[in-house]
Image (cartoon, helix red, strand yellow):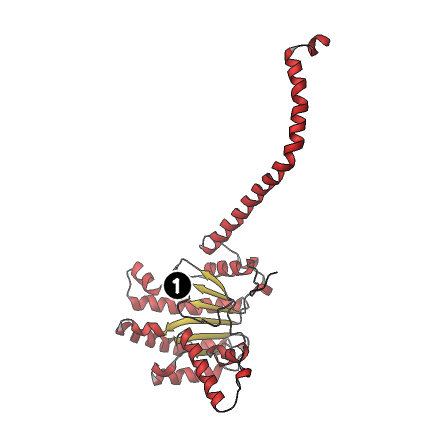
Amino acid sequence: MLSLLSSPLSLLFLFLIPCLFITSYIWFPVFLPKLLGLIKFKAARDDHDNEKRYDEGTCVVREEELQRELMPRHVALILDGNRRWAKQHGLLTEQGHQAGAIRFIEIAELCFELGIHTVSAFAFSTGNWGRDEDEVKWLISLFQHQLKSNIQYFHRNEIRVSVIGNQTNIPELILQRIHEIEETTKGYKNKHLIMAIDYSGRFDIMHACKSLVKKSEKGLIREQDVDEALIERELLTNCTDFPNPDLMIRTSGEQRISNFFLWQLAYTELFFSPVLWPDFDKDKLLEALASYQRRERRFGCRV
């Protein structure tokens, strides 16, 4: 036994054990937090990557995974990509718009089935008047056709329909159809479809300001009466119980709001899908809703 302890290898071993113990005692508290931090950082990156995959439209979501109580009350849609979709499929631009119009009714119906109260769509912006004249005429006629062909559908499913925007350039015949549908569906309470035609967010705010000025001139309001609630009542979205969208979805990969609901989108959650609008189906809608339900809405406050 003594001979073993007196060997050089044994002496080295006996020297190293206390050194290792002392080193571990000193450095373990230093390296452990760093190790845990690396693990936590990787988990955070994985969560970020999963979130990114959802927004890029690569994750499949089942309807039963969504929570009804967390559904948005108002979903706003920017229907982008009809012309590119038509070009990709070797079709006419008009056929792309027609496919987009059909898809809009389908998506709105899905939203209502999921318990969403209000669905709004940026169907025709004020800037769209600058497009090719034939395309503009076709879009206006398509809108007229959609109103006429879906009127029974609106009543059968008790959907209230509102059309907002600058109506001074809309043909009189279409205005009559709009007013007829708005009047006959205004009693429906649980589903609301809003179509923005010749609409721009700047026009909406300007229209509200002019209305307030007129009321001030008539002595109906004073300067101290003007607040956010009063302005909201003058915006064109005052037709709905939920004027400010909880979720806005834009298709085709573009990541901007393009002069849509400038006031109303202040605290809206945004979802940008890479797919073109005619390809935006139920699976893509569920992805957007799942992304919305995973977010923590603070409305400017720290929680």
Label 1 sits on a secondary structure element that is: helix
Residue that label 1 marks: 277
Q: Residue furthest top?
A: 3
Near-viewer residue (85 or 274): 274
Could you say where residue 1 lies in the image, as x and y percent from the top left?
73, 10
Q: Amino acid at mark 1?
A: Trp
| Number of marks in the rendered image | 1
- Can residue 151 be seen at all in this image of the molecule? no
- Can residue 48 be seen at all in this image of the molecule? yes
Could you say where residue 245 lies in the image, as x and y percent from the top left?
50, 69
Question: What residue is shown at x 42% (from left), y 79% (from top)?
Answer: 206
Q: Quadrant of the C terminus?
A: bottom right
Q: Residue furthest right?
A: 1
In the picture provided, is 185 more to the left or to the right than 27?
Answer: left
Crowding at mark 1 (Cα within 10 Å: few <14, some 14-19, many 20+): many
Question: What residue is shown at x 65% (from left), y 24% (from top)?
Answer: 19
Could you say where residue 12 lies in the image, as x and y percent from the top left?
64, 16
Question: What residue is shown at x 65% (from left), y 37% (from top)?
Answer: 29
**Quadrant location of residue 130?**
bottom left
Near-viewer residue (265 or 101): 265
* For residue 145, above or below residue 285: below
Could you say where residue 199 lies in the image, as x and y percent from the top left?
39, 75
